[in-house]
Image (tube, coloured by chain):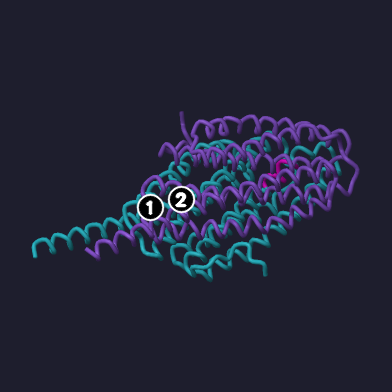
Chain colours: A purple, B cyan
Amino acid sequence: MAKVEQGTTEGKRMQISFDEELAALKEKILLMGSKVEEAIRLAMKSLVDRDSKLARQVIQSDRDVNDLEIEVDEICHRLLALHQPMAGDMRFITSAMKINSDLERMGDMAVNIAERALTLNEVAPLKPFIDIPHMASIAQEMVKVSLDSLVNKDADAAKKVCERDDEVDNLNDQIIRELISYMLEDRANIKRALDLILVSRYLERVADHATNVAEDVIYMVQGKDIRHRRG
Amino acid sequence: MAKVEQGTTEGKRMQISFDEELAALKEKILLMGSKVEEAIRLAMKSLVDRDSKLARQVIQSDRDVNDLEIEVDEICHRLLALHQPMAGDMRFITSAMKINSDLERMGDMAVNIAERALTLNEVAPLKPFIDIPHMASIAQEMVKVSLDSLVNKDADAAKKVCERDDEVDNLNDQIIRELISYMLEDRANIKRALDLILVSRYLERVADHATNVAEDVIYMVQGKDIRHRRG
């Protein structure tokens, strides 16, 4: 009798620790997401406002995201190694490991944008910023909604993120075409236009990573893989 | 007695199935790796030999890599869900999930290079190819060695991959500088130079992904994380 009770208490303790660790995992992913969203926002601000001090801050603060990536991975490993998660939790944990990589790479994109800002802020502006901030705001929105869909286990919201990826790709193509026309017009524009093309591509990759996150959420919720559909 | 024997047989059957599935995972990852290596090699060949038919083949065959990505993920999920892998196997499986994503993205880079080849093959060559094929061969070597290091659980070989990443980054910077000088020289060079800059960046990203694979191998072998070391 005593033995059975002990077993039950042990089981409960294990359960609580599992639930607590799972909650901590969710919290860290969201913290990382909010840091990445902020980094992209500030990197764009450093470009548009020509604020190199801010750009350097963005580059510095990427450390926090990198540290969080390692922490999230450690929590995932502990959850998998010490507990035997059920199918649903298992899918959450393995999705979290992938989303973790995507978030870290979005952080790298914010750093890349800030680095371009540092170069561009040294020279006269090529043209007023219109399309690139527009593209940035769509990409940021995609990051936000993809993480909300993770928390709410909302596959419909995640699908909407995937749908917006084409919009960003089209905008990227349009921006590159316009910047090439600036290059053709005057060779003095070439370096600046090239830096802006890179910024546009970094934002496109942010949107790609948000789409990856959304696809992982759909997999997690529905237990089916929607990547590379041939339909 | 009969029951104990049955239990043992059951245990053995489970073990064999686990080992078999783990072996299948290794095999699929290597198959995927060899397909990706080949795709990068052929994409570069389609560019250097101006062979658009080959470029289209590369784009088509990316489906195989995408299918393998889904298969590998499924095997990893089954291994984690149906068995309770020991620490070493667990690290192999979670590393395999990440390496899987990196390989799939390298496949995308081969497609991107082939797409640039299609565009570039329509116009006269800008200049003879020297540095870009050199960079490609380093990146391909990094992919190969990173996968060998995975199979042989060889952290030293993996470390050598990480060390070569700087070499590729420097080569990329040099290539971009040279291509910008072509752009400045004659506006007729701009579009072609820009396409070549993109090819150079795709190769740089292949090297980045190979470095990610190598870092995962080091983590797997040594059980410690070497990402984002602060020196």
Question: For this view, does A127 lie left or right of residue B117?
Answer: right
Find out whether residue B210 is within the magenta segment: no
Q: Position of residue A13 (x, y in %)?
A: 38, 60
Q: Nearer the viewer, residue A187 or A20?
A: A20
Report helix, strand or loop for mark 1.
Answer: loop
**Residue marked by disc 1:** A85
Magenta span: B194-199
Q: Residues within 10 Å of mark 2 (few under 14, many from 20)?
A: many
Q: Position of residue A61 (x, y in %)?
A: 71, 56
Q: Position of residue A209 (x, y in %)?
A: 59, 43
Q: Nearer the viewer, residue B194 or B166?
A: B166
Residue at 71 percent of width and 48 percent of height: A39
Amino acid type, residue under disc 1 in the picture: Pro
Looking at the rendered structure, which numbered label has been put on residue A95? none
Q: Is residue A158 visible?
A: yes
Kindly indicate the quadrant of the structure image that contains residue A10: bottom left
Question: For this view, does B123 lie left or right of residue B213?
Answer: right
SS assignment for the magenta stretch, majority: helix
Name the image quarter holding the C terminus of chain B: bottom right
Amino acid type, residue under disc 2 in the picture: Ile
Find the distance from the CA under tag 1 to the CA under tag 2.
Answer: 9 Å
User: Marks 1 and 2: CB-CB under 8 Å?
Assistant: yes
**Residue marked by disc 2:** A93
Q: Residues within 10 Å of mark 1 (few under 14, many from 20)?
A: some
